[in-house]
Image: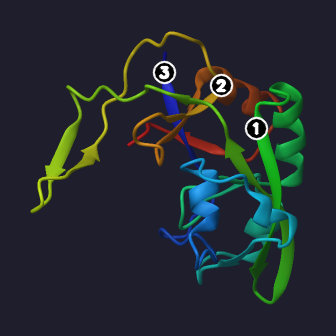
Amino acid sequence: MKLYSLESQINSGGDVIDISDPKGRISSYFIWSEGNGSFLNFMTPHGVAQKKIRYSDVSELDFLSANIGVPIFSEKAMNEIDDFIPGKLEWYKIIISCEGRDVACNLCKVNRYLSLIDKDKSFFRVLSDGEKILSKAVYKDTFEDDFIIARDVDFKERLVVSQSFVDFCHSKNLKINFDSPV
């Protein structure tokens, strides 16, 4: 199965949306699936577009890259994706500030965790304390189950989508780019 990473169509030289997460609750909930996300009942996350990102990018594109590995989708993309794979994802509003204006977008919590990375073929860096850090992931070719979008069960910051997700997004003219996952 061919896998892809989600990429923004913004030509920003690497600039992304900075999501304010001083307590680490957003990344803990959305990436590592820790806690129940109840804090989101009492606050709306905020993000700020870095310098090279324009308001037109934020307001017109369907996917935005963030400083933490949580996907940000437009309202249009959220509705289309939710119709395609109903009940598989959780959605939460985020307000993105860019060039003095705000745009409402949606954070996406992926609830599917699978063994995606081939640990024998991947490359690791060893820290001074002996801990291994994944430096270059090599993804498996086959999986027990077909899936549309998933995170790796061990390296949860790694998020990938399938060819069927890519084909669906193209069929709906969603402004999202795709690349080989790293």
Residue 106 rendering spot, x and y as whole percentages: 80, 57
Whether 122 is drawn above or below 108: the answer is: above
2 or 1: tag closer to the N-terminus = 1
Direction from residue 1 to residue 161 in the image, left or right: right
Residue 89 rendering spot, x and y as whole percentages: 76, 38
Q: Identify residue for label 2.
A: 148
> At numbered mark 2, what does the secondary structure look like: helix, strand or loop?
loop
What's the image's color scheme? Answer: rainbow
x 65%, y 29%: residue: 166
Mark 2 and mark 1: Cα distance apart in space: 11 Å
Instruction: Report the mark closest to the observer, 2 or 1.
Output: 1
Residue 141 rendering spot, x and y as whole percentages: 39, 15
2 or 3: tag closer to the N-terminus = 3
Residue at the far bottom in the pictured view: 100
> At numbered mark 1, what does the secondary structure look like: helix, strand or loop?
strand
Which quadrant holds residue 27?
bottom right
Identify which amino acid the numbered label 1 is placed on: Leu
The label shown at residue 2 is 3
x 90%, y 41%: residue: 79
Q: Identify residue for label 1.
A: 89
Mark 1 and mark 3 in contact (Cβ < 8 Å)? no
Which quadrant holds residue 84?
top right
Which quadrant holds residue 104?
bottom right
Identify which amino acid the numbered label 2 is placed on: Ile
Residue 18 rendering spot, x and y as whole percentages: 60, 75
